[in-house]
Image (spheres, rainbow, N blue to C red):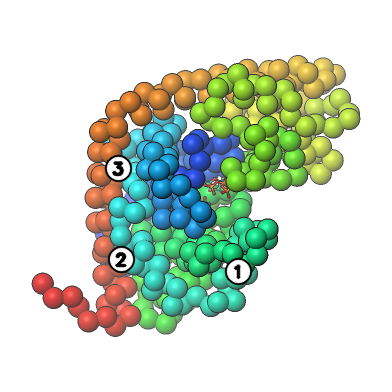
Amino acid sequence: MSDAPTALPRVLSGIQPTADSFHFGNYLGATRQWVALQEEFEPFFFIADLHALTMEHDPKKLADRTRVAAAQLIAMGIDPERSAVFAQSHVPEHAELAWVMSSLTGFGEARRMTQFKDKTAKGGEGAASVALFNYPILQAADILLYRPQYVPVGEDQRQHLELTRDLAQRFNHRFKKTFRLPEAYILKETAKITDLQQPDKKMSKSASSPGGIIELLEDPKVSAKKIRSAVTDSETEVRFDEEAKPGVSNLLTIYSALTGRSIDDLEKAYAGRGYGDFKGDLADVVVEFVTPFRARTLELLDDRAELDAVLKSGAGRAREVASRTLADVYERVGFLPAQG
Ligand code: ATP
Ligand code: LTN
């Protein structure tokens, strides 16, 4: 590996610009860990706009959503001086390495990905794009280019991380040791935030109903109302039990993550008080969190030139690393060196 031995280990992750706002699942499951990890690692965080093409998309919205995603990351605490924040499409090495990795991926192996199965369940495989099929291969390339130690994501991405490790191992074995085997960094407590209306399903921008998802940029009054109307159960006891009480458990998870109070402590504090008080207090906690976040994001969006400069500088830093890895790969698979 060509990295200097004194260099900090790297952390890398990505998020798709497929909605007008991130939601609480994205934040608590993934991006909050990005913020925490940037201190002790060399951090690379990107907006996965190439991945956004795997489902039908609106080209008029994509560029704006990419900027909004970058603004939200910064508003949440990603420091662009420390972290390389960039758009995936600005670093062409991602698509280039994906092609090479696709040559090492079995058709059956790609077809077994549960996300592919889920996303084609409704319309059938025939209606899906080849890009959707290739999605995890591109994700593997995203990761392997930077040789990171950790990839902070939610539980739903575990299988893609396993595929990434398999492909890295296969390449290292078939050619020469080139890639570091990355580890998924998944925080158990918040790995799967669930839908407020269907607490057995994950909160998701594509599958949740408006009442089931809390978007970080929606009107905080709306978020408060959604918390107060979250589905619970016919008991009255605030107790963490994912099997028997998935709705209450999810609210406890959110409450604990936002305040730093333990679940135990919260259970005690609400003993004998019923769901009304509990939800009302959580609604206040949520409003307190999203109000300044939203204001900061809107402020950052007011200065587009500055955001674009952050993305440009991030892409420059990313390319320095990505181009070195890709050059190693091209040499090892036997490509004739490009002239000049
Ligand atoms: P989609 O519904 O289209 O699959 P999504 O809502 O899952 O989208 P992504 O952009 O795919 O959002 O996810 C970005 C990051 O947020 C990933 O690391 C993912 O694992 C994490 N994440 C998404 N939803 C949740 C959730 N409900 N709980 C925990 N983590 C989540
Ligand atoms: N598939 C991820 C987004 C993503 C990603 C990555 C995450 C694309 N490339 C590389 C980590 C590392 C998702 O959140 N749905």
Amino acid type shown at disc 3: Leu
Within 10 Å of the Cα at label 3, are there few (<14), some (14-19), or many (20+) other Cα atoms?
many
Q: Residues within 10 Å of mark 1 (few under 14, many from 20)?
A: few
What residue is drawn where x is 51% and y is 54%? 56
Choose mark 2 or mark 3, whichever is in front: 3
Residue where numbered disc 1 is placed: 126
Q: Earlier in the sequence, mark 1 or mark 3?
A: 1
Question: Is label 2 within 8 A of ligand 2 (CB to nearest ligand atom)?
Answer: no
Residue type at mark 2 is: Thr
Measured along the vertical axis of the image, is residue 248 above or below residue 277? below
Please tell me which residue is depicted at 29% across the width and 32% down the height of the picture: 304
Q: Which residue is mark 3?
A: 311
Up/down of 203 relative to 103, above or below? above
Q: Residue at x 28, y 38 (%)?
A: 308
Residue type highlighted by circle 1: Gly
- Element at badge 1? helix
Q: Quadrant of the N terminus?
A: bottom left
